[in-house]
Image (tube, rainbow, N blue to C red):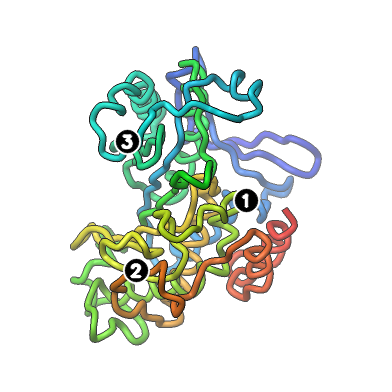
Amino acid sequence: RDIGVTGVQTCALPIYLSTLRELPWQTASALVICDYARADGSWVAEAPRSVLRRQLDRLTGRGWSAACASELEFFLFQQSYEAAFAAGYRDLQPSSDYRIDYHLMQPTRDEALMRAIRNGLTGADVPVESSKGEWSRGQHEVNFRHTEPLAMADRHTLFKQGVKEIAAAHGKSVSFMAKLAPSEAGNSCHIHMSLWEKGRSLFAPAARAARGRGRGGDARDSTGSPVFRQFLGGLMKYLPELCLFSAPTINSYKRYQPGSWAPTRMAWAHDNRTTGFRIVGEGSSLRIENRMPGADANPYLAFAAMLAAGLAGVEEGLDCGPAYVGNAYRDPALRRLPSSLSEAADLFEGSVLAREAFGPEVVAFYVRH
């Protein structure tokens, strides 16, 4: 059952025992997740979990649900956190001397820690689907099994905390910074998302005739259902002005560099990693991979931004147009992402959609903070 604990006179913490889980990497420890509510029981709108709940309520109002999953990347260093601090975080030694994307030997050398991460997080109800070495020296990626957005955001948050604690227990340290060094790839948080209704994918091509509002698919490209095309059209139109929820720090914008695997402009394709959106799967597994967020993103806010932008596309009957062909990094005709935190904050503050979807108090809070 769910209970509430009063913290101070003006707020309360509703505790959800359904989120209770053991933490295998700690001794005799468990974790439970709370929301942030006022004493009268109303949600604190600015809290990240509340921001996501508001968008999920919009989905529920349509009789829809969403499935999503995060992909998180991080750098693994040989030094402990204490040693890294003492060195001023300079000259840290990555766990490998060479780039390890799809390499067989180096991930094996890190396997004692990576196995502890996979087993520990899976034991804490964060089901890990796979892990692999990534492009940069000492960089790793872990993928999760998909679920509904609120549970996925909870798992994502616990994963980052768990990885840091497990690494510390092994005398190592990790970083989820979006852009650790100019010469290295950034740490991404690719988000996969699809919409569902009564167990049926609303993105699958079979749903084309049954669902959809507005213009539907472009005659030059028949990928997905009308809902898929409208949702993706909303992402392409609105995510640049909601970028503050995907890239929340000054460092986030250092990641948006041409040729860096991180997107810089709005376009979609099936297997073109120069674009902001990659379309993955087929049939009922058809989904959108949003490549904008970095590993420093707050998952509750990043998921909420995707849902707000995508639902706006559905409501406005937008279309995503044909799949992009070519190098999106070199195409000035494509709309670009903000290049700085200041620019992103200005766009967010001036966004009509942000105020309508999240509320003016939420916009004001995140622009200030």
Rendered view: 83 above or below 3: above
> Which disc, if any, is residue 327?
2
Residue position for label 1? 249
Labels 2 & 1 near each other (Cβ < 8 A): no
- Residue 137 location (% of width, % of height): 40, 35
Between 140 and 47, the one lying in front of the other is 140
* Residue displayed at 49% across by 58% down: 257
Q: Which residue sits furthest top? A: 27
Labels 2 & 3 near each other (Cβ < 8 A): no
Q: Is residue 118 left or right of residue 156?
A: left
* Residue displayed at 25% across by 26% down: 105
Element on which disc 3 rests: loop
Q: Amino acid at mark 2?
A: Asn
Q: To which quarter of the image does residue 74 belong?
A: top left
- Residue 266 location (% of width, % of height): 43, 70
* Residue displayed at 62% across by 76% down: 352
- Residue 240 location (% of width, % of height): 53, 68
Between 80 and 10, the one lying in front of the other is 80
Q: Is residue 277 visible?
A: yes
Q: Earlier in the sequence, mark 3 or mark 1?
A: 3
> Which disc, if any, is residue 100?
3
Q: Is residue 194 visible?
A: no
